[in-house]
Image (cartoon, grey):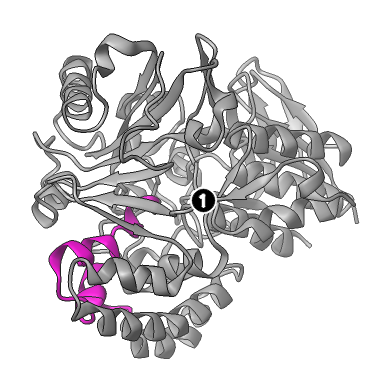
Amino acid sequence: MAKRIVVIGSGFGGMAVAARLAARGHAVTLFEKRDKLGGRAYVYEVNGFKFDGGPTVITAPWLFDELWTLAGRRREDDVQFVPCDPFYRIFDHNGRQFNYNGDHQFILSQIEQWSVADKAGYERFMRSTKEIFDTGMALIDKPFLHVTDMLRVAPDLIRLQSYRSVYGYVSQFIQDEFLRRCFSFHPLLIGGNPMDAASLYVLIHYLERQWGIHYAMGGTGALVEGIGRLLTALGVTVHLNTAVDEIVVEGRKVKGVRLADGTLHQADAVVSNADVAWTYMNLIPARLRKTNTDRRLERLKYSMSLFVIYFGAKRRYTDTPLAHHNIILSERYEELLRDIFDRKILPEDFSLYLHMPTITDPSLAPAGHEAFYVLAPVPHLGASVDWTKQARPYRNAIMSFLETNYLPDLQANLVAEHSIDPIHFQNTLNSYLGSAFSVQPTLLQSAWFRPHNQSEDFDNLYFVGAGTHPGAGLPGVLSSAKIVEGLLD
């Protein structure tokens, strides 16, 4: 039977669940408080440049293809994905580089330049991660609503050493310290500390090897626009510039949402793509939440935040050693991560992800110009960092580092710039504590231990996105939409 469904937020999880439910025949209304679709994938347009606000790494293309199939279309006819090679170029603190892609022999040749002995270790690592990958991918679109769901998979998780950290798991096979970092950084892409994230997440490396890393021509924004056209074709009603002020509840049922202007929209079910903790704490009075109390939500461990600078230069930098996706590691690794995640202090050094999309797609910048964004993991707002005072000096330190080491004469060639910090994640993206990826992916915050896709407090309230199962990253949030589709039907 067709239901009236309200979706709060238009990140990839919200757009995907809206498309899936509309294709099922439900009457879906989506509310987005900003002026464009996309959530964290918002596009900033500055002086002729287009900067993708958030996700830039596409690792599971078939999850997008499924959305187009629901509408009787082909994704390839609307949005073009192109493979990236290398997947990443990873630099140590001296600027020496390591590349990897989907070619096994190429990776072994790269490993050989650092440690001949680790070639055999990497072979063993890949064999061991295949089973982890197969187990993890079998769980990625299954709901974990009951403790019995967890007990059923617990023996596999124990056998696969999920109690180890990603870094600890990798270190069993790889001896060279820099190579350990190259094969253990992946939890940072979903808000986890490689020293704490459950070793289950080594499957990300295997997933990249299996299906590659892709880029959407025109930027991630072109992918958002393509899904927006799908929503229209599927009959989803989209309201932009429309903030939800309250989820209206009666007993164990949600009755709809009240907008900031006081308008009430009734619904048979509500799906929130907003941050889980923010949704509960800001849209539902505490007295009505018996299980998801403020205290319970506050006790969860949340991911780091991010400081991101989007910038454009009036010259090309194709004569530098940079690739499309670059990771620049600090001399410190474990201690830097401890500063960010545990001590919650803003360190003087930083590890960076530098995105250079105009290598693949010059259309994102005016002719002869180069577009970038650089991202540094930083503590969330549980730290005593005053970003109103720290943002400018931190920006200057990063840009000076890039100019000295990778982008000659950068400051003189800057013609566009925009930046965001943890305050943006809190106030604009409605993320609790300004966390960039919501709940951390530790073992005791994975699967059944994560906030559930269906609320324990209200029978017809559902969650998609980074903070619920299976977690952050495009494969995770798209899979959460599949889970909610199944639960609602």
Q: Which residues are magenta?
A: 162-189
362 left or right, relative to 174: right
Relative to residue 16, is residue 357 depicted above or below?
Answer: above
Give the residue type at disc 1. Cys
Relative to residue 178, is residue 380 depicted above or below?
Answer: above
Q: Say which residue label 1 marks.
A: 84
Residue 75 percent across, percent down from the top left:
77, 48
Q: Nearer the viewer, residue 450 or 316?
A: 316
Rendering quarter of residue 379: top left
Helix, strand or loop at mark 1: loop
Is any atom of residue 195 visible in this view? no
Quadrant showing the C terminus: bottom right
Per the image, is 248 magenta? Answer: no
Per the image, is 187 magenta? Answer: yes
Residue 185 percent across, percent down from the top left:
29, 58
In the image, what residue occupies the spot 54% across and 12% down?
A: 48
In the image, what residue occupies the spot 15% across and 75% down?
A: 175
Relative to residue 363, is residue 289 depicted above or below?
Answer: below
Residue 485 percent across, percent down from the top left:
72, 58
Residue 254 percent across, percent down from the top left:
66, 44
Q: Nearer the viewer, residue 242 or 333?
A: 333
In the image, what residue occupies the spot 20% across and 48% down?
A: 329
Q: Nearer the viewer, residue 322 or 52?
A: 322
